[in-house]
Image (spheres, rainbow, N blue to C red):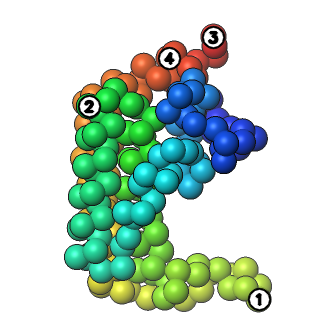
Amino acid sequence: MKKFDYSLNYEELDLRKHPELYAVGRGEQGVLMVEPYKSEILPYWRFKTPEIATESSEKIYELFLEYKKKDDFVGMDMARKFLQMGYTRARRYTNHKGGRKYSKEDGSILPYQNDKVKAEAAAIFKAQWEIAKTDPDYIEMKKQHREKYESENV
C-alpha cells in the first residue's frame, strides 16, 4: 500500500484528471487537500447538532453516490473520508469542549466530558461512513485503484 504523498502541489493538482497520483493512505489523510473534491464536499461538511449532521452526512453520501455513478473512485474515497472526519471531529467535540484535546501549557490530555448532542451527531456520521466504506462497488473500486496505481509494481 502506497503512503499518501504530501509532497504533491495539491492546490494546483486536479486529481479527477490525475487519479493515478492519488493514494488512499490511512484514515482521513489528504481530506482537506485533494482537489477538486475538497471544494465540492467541504461546503456541506457540518456537525454542530444532530439535525445539521443528518443533513450534512446525507448530502455527502449523495455526493458519494454521484461519484460512484461517474466511476470516480477518488471522489468516492474523498466523500468517505469526509464522512469519517465528521465522525471523528464530532467525537472530539463530544469528549472535549471546544475540540481541543491537548493542553497548550504541557501537552497533557484535557479532562473528558460527554456532550450528548455532539455524541448523537457523531453517531449519525458514523452510520453514513459505515454505509459508504462497506459499499460493494466502493470496495471493488478501491481494490482496483490500489492494484493499478498503488502496487509495488507501478
* Residue 72 image offset from top left, x and y in percent: 39, 31
- The tag earlier along the polypeptide, 1 or 3, is 1
Kindly indicate the quadrant of the structure image that contains residue 139: top left
Regarding residue 104, the answer to whether it shows in the image is yes
Mark 2 to mark 3 CA distance (whole Å): 29 Å
Residue at x-position 67% and y-position 42%:
12
Mark 2 to mark 1 CA distance (whole Å): 49 Å
Q: Are marks 3 and 4 in contact (CB under 8 Å)?
A: no
Q: Which residue is mark 4?
A: 147
Which of these two is toward me, 52 or 142? Answer: 52
Regarding residue 134, the answer to whether it shows in the image is no
* Residue 6 image offset from top left, x and y in percent: 70, 43
Q: Which residue is mark 2?
A: 69
Q: Residues within 10 Å of mark 4 (few under 14, many from 20)?
A: some
Question: Which mark is on residue 153?
Answer: 3
- The tag earlier along the polypeptide, 4 or 2, is 2
Mark 1 to mark 4 CA distance (whole Å): 46 Å
Question: Which mark is on residue 40?
Answer: none
